[in-house]
Amino acid sequence: MARALCYLILLMLSVQAHVARADIYSFVDEAGVTHFSNVPTDGRYRLVLAAPPEPASAPASSGNTQWLTRSRAFDPFIETAAREAQVQPQLVRAIIVVESAFNPKAVSRKGAVGLMQLLPKTARRYGASNAFDPKQNINAGTRYLRDLIARYGNNLELVLAAYNAGEDAVERYGKRIPPYAETRQYVPAVLSIYRALTGAHAAS
């Protein structure tokens, strides 16, 4: 998951070689579909993530640029899962951005897989027999998220800390964000994207 954070930063730095800043924009259309772009050609786009100026030595990866396009393919799954679990779809999207950058084949060093980076036991717990399947992964991840929200009383910092480090870790540290470097990076990263997406949705 920490790798996914680095991956996201690299994505933002290398969206297009000829763009000085790889800022990411988003808007929600009349059908409720969220659109992402690094080239805001529509007046409805609002800034979601601002990248720092691209250094001359920034690595390039043409494959990474495809996440903006890939994300649209999963909108129906996100919207349906979020509605059924009564979770905001913007929160689900923000988690997916940080966890996997919309790569359904992502695998972490700890064995978490798919869009929402589910560990095998979590996938089984929430009925995902194939955690690489985008629909199953999103359904299971969103239901897990729903239970964490119920458990931590809408305290999103603890919800996200538990999603990243596990409920046991949050409980062990007195219902506080565990002092793990990865988790302390993860929580504000997801919250930042979530708030930006929420703002873009409200402005649409």
Image: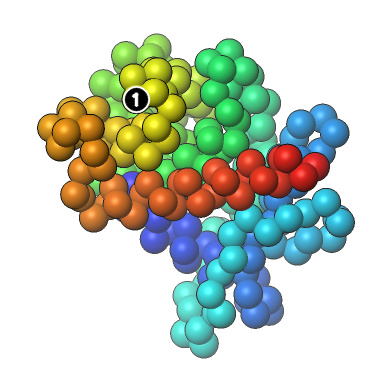
The spot of residue 194 in percent (x, y) is 55, 43
Measuring 86% from the left and 55% from the top, which residue is drawn there? 42
The spot of residue 199 in percent (x, y) is 67, 46
Q: How is the image coloured?
A: rainbow
- Residue holding disc 1: 152
Question: In the visual, does 110 lie left or right of 78?
Answer: left
Question: In the visual, does 119 lie left or right of 55?
Answer: left
| Vertical order, 33 against 129 (above or below) | below
| Vertical order, 108 against 142 (above or below) | below
- Is the C terminus in the top left, top right, bottom left or bottom right quadrant? top right
Number of numbered discs on residues:
1
User: Which of the 4 quarters of the picture holds residue 38?
Assistant: bottom right
Measuring 73% from the left and 40% from the top, which residue is drawn there? 202
Q: Amino acid at mark 1?
A: Tyr
User: Which of the 4 quarters of the picture holds residue 63?
Assistant: bottom right
Question: In the visual, does 167 lie left or right of 139?
Answer: left
The spot of residue 182 in percent (x, y) is 27, 52
Measuring 30% from the left and 33% from the top, which residue is drawn there? 162
Question: In the visual, does 116 lie left or right of 162?
Answer: right
Q: Residues within 10 Å of mark 1 (few under 14, many from 20)?
A: some
Secondary element type, mark 1: loop
Residue 20, visible in the rendered structure: yes
Q: Residue furthest bottom?
A: 56
| Vertical order, 128 against 162 (above or below) | above
User: Which of the 4 quarters of the picture holds residue 78?
Assistant: top right
The spot of residue 56 in percent (x, y) is 52, 87
Residue 135, visible in the rendered structure: no
